[in-house]
């Protein structure tokens, strides 16, 4: 059975750089607080009207396809991971397929937030190994800047997130020392509300704490959004930051160790760990726990913030462009986020 290799990789970030100090015009915060708690110095924001999650994904995809030495017509399946889609539905996969004028190949959208890229990789790996597809395009893209609470109330979340996209082309390989060794996926829906955007949604429990009078506005079949929901910021992402942090520092090392143990390898064998860029403090904790050196871990959250599904392919691409990912290297990708969902992928480049 063939293994799956990354044949081409690309990323795109918008031109507009937003420093921590730029955020002071919207909320009470400080460069010192943001850097100390998250490691973020700046992030990118997409053009409000000319760029979307899909258009950024297209730019990353073009680079990945070119670097794979193929054309868009060779792609036989599309996987698109995002939590900030252009439309409520349909997903960004078909929008990208249309924008790139690709054939009528399948397009699948993955909704696993920060773990979206790892989940996408795992799904694609199964299709490649069974021989069903030969050139799978994975795109992970986020336009967070359009949907954040930029008031002081939302500062614990809005300072973290940035916009950007990453993409890879996956192909089968028969080369012995190359390809995905294993992927490991987990979830725990018990904590779903700890990091979530509730409305507009169809879950009645999030309506029930509203005064009955509110519902008089909503006719059957109408998506309901009350003033109270907006007052409670339920139209923005909500996060219990410390709770997410505590869970992340346990699950990251656990799922990385799971991948290493499965392949009879040790942390010292890793050439590079690329953790989802959630918070530099989380990455540093994981590094310490696994006793990894600075050279074994790649972080770029200082420049881009947390780009959710896109953070791993952006970081992997930057590391590769900087010559930090070489043929035969043992690379581990790992993520934890909303759901909670988490996972890892171990591969030989
Ligand atoms: N600027 C200034 N002060 C702030 C800010 C800000 N941007 N944000 C919060 N504060 C204040 C709070 O109001 C609080 O003040 P108080 O003590 O007077 O009440 C104080 O700072 C501490 O707040 P905490 O929320 O406890 O701060 P913490 O040190 O936990 O840092 C953070 C917050 C950065 C969000 C952290 O909890 C974190 O990174 N959590 C994990 C995030 C994560 O990994 N998310 C998963 C990925 S995202 C995804 O899946 C979509």
Image (cartoon, rainbow, N blue to C red):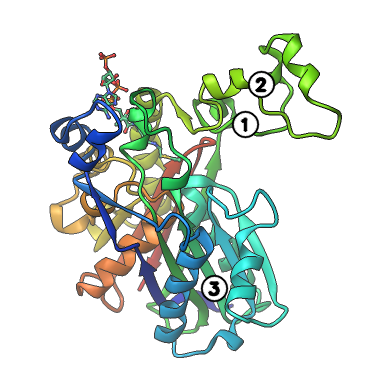
Q: Quadrant of the N terminus?
A: bottom right
Q: Position of residue 107 (x, y in %)?
A: 67, 67
The answer to whether one can see residue 339 in this image is yes
Q: Is residue 338 left or right of residue 289?
A: right
Of callouts 3 and 1, the N-terminal one: 3
Neighbour tally class for label 2: few under 14, some 14-19, many 20 plus, Cα within 10 Å: some
Is the CB–ligand 1 distance for label 2 below 8 Å? no
Q: Which residue is mark 1?
A: 199
Q: Which residue is painted at 47% across and 82% down in the image?
A: 65
Q: CA distance from mark 1 to mark 2?
A: 8 Å
Image-quarter location of ligand 1:
top left
Is 248 above or below relative to 12? above
- For mark 3, what is the residue? 137
Q: Secondary structure at mark 2?
A: helix
Dot 3 surroundings within 10 Å: few (below 14), some, or many (20 or more)?
many
The residue tagged 2 is 206
Residue in the foreground of this view, choosing between 126 and 196: 196
Sequence-first tag of 1 and 2: 1
Q: 20 and 110: which one is in front?
A: 20
Q: Is residue 95 above or below residue 200?
A: below
**Camera-nearest residue between 165 and 255:** 165
* Position in image of residue 46 (x %, y %): 39, 57
Secondary structure state at the residue bearing disc 3? strand
CA separation in Å, label 3 and label 1: 31 Å
């Amino acid at each position: 059975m063939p293994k799956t290799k990354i044949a081409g990789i690309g990323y795109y970030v918008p031109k507009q750089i937003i420093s921590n100090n730029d955020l002071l015009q919207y909320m009470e915060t400080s460069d010192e607080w943001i850097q100390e708690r998250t490691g973020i110095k700046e992030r990118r924001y997409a053009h409000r009207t000319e760029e979307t999650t899909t258009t950024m994904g297209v730019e990353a995809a073009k680079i990945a396809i070119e670097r794979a030495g193929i054309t868009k017509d060779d792609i036989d399946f599309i996987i698109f991971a995002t939590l900030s889609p252009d439309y409520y539905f349909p997903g960004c996969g078909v929008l990208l397929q249309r924008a790139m004028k690709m054939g009528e190949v399948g397009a699948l959208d993955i909704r696993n937030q920060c773990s979206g890229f790892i989940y996408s990789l795992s799904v694609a790996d199964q299709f490649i190994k069974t021989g069903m597809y030969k050139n799978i395009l994975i795109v992970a893209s986020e336009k967070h800047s359009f949907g954040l609470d930029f008031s002081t109330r939302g500062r614990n979340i809005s300072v973290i997130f940035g916009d950007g996209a990453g993409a890879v082309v996956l192909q089968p390989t028969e080369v012995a020392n190359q390809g995905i060794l294993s992927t490991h996926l987990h979830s725990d829906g018990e904590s779903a509300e700890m990091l979530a955007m509730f409305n507009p949604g169809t879950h009645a429990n999030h309506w029930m704490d509203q005064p009955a009078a509110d519902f008089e506005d909503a006719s059957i079949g109408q998506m309901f959004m009350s003033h109270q929901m907006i007052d409670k910021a339920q139209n923005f992402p909500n996060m219990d930051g410390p709770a997410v942090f505590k869970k992340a520092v346990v699950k990251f090392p656990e799922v990385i160790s799971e991948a290493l143990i499965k392949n009879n390898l040790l942390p010292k064998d890793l050439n590079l760990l690329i953790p989802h860029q959630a918070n530099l403090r989380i990455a540093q904790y994981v590094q310490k726990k696994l006793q990894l050196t600075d050279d074994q871990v790649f972080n770029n959250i200082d420049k881009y913030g947390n780009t959710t599904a896109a953070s791993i392919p952006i970081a992997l691409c930057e590391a590769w462009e900087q010559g930090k990912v070489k043929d035969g290297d043992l690379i581990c990708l790992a993520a934890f986020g909303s759901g909670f969902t988490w996972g890892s992928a171990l591969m030989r480049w």
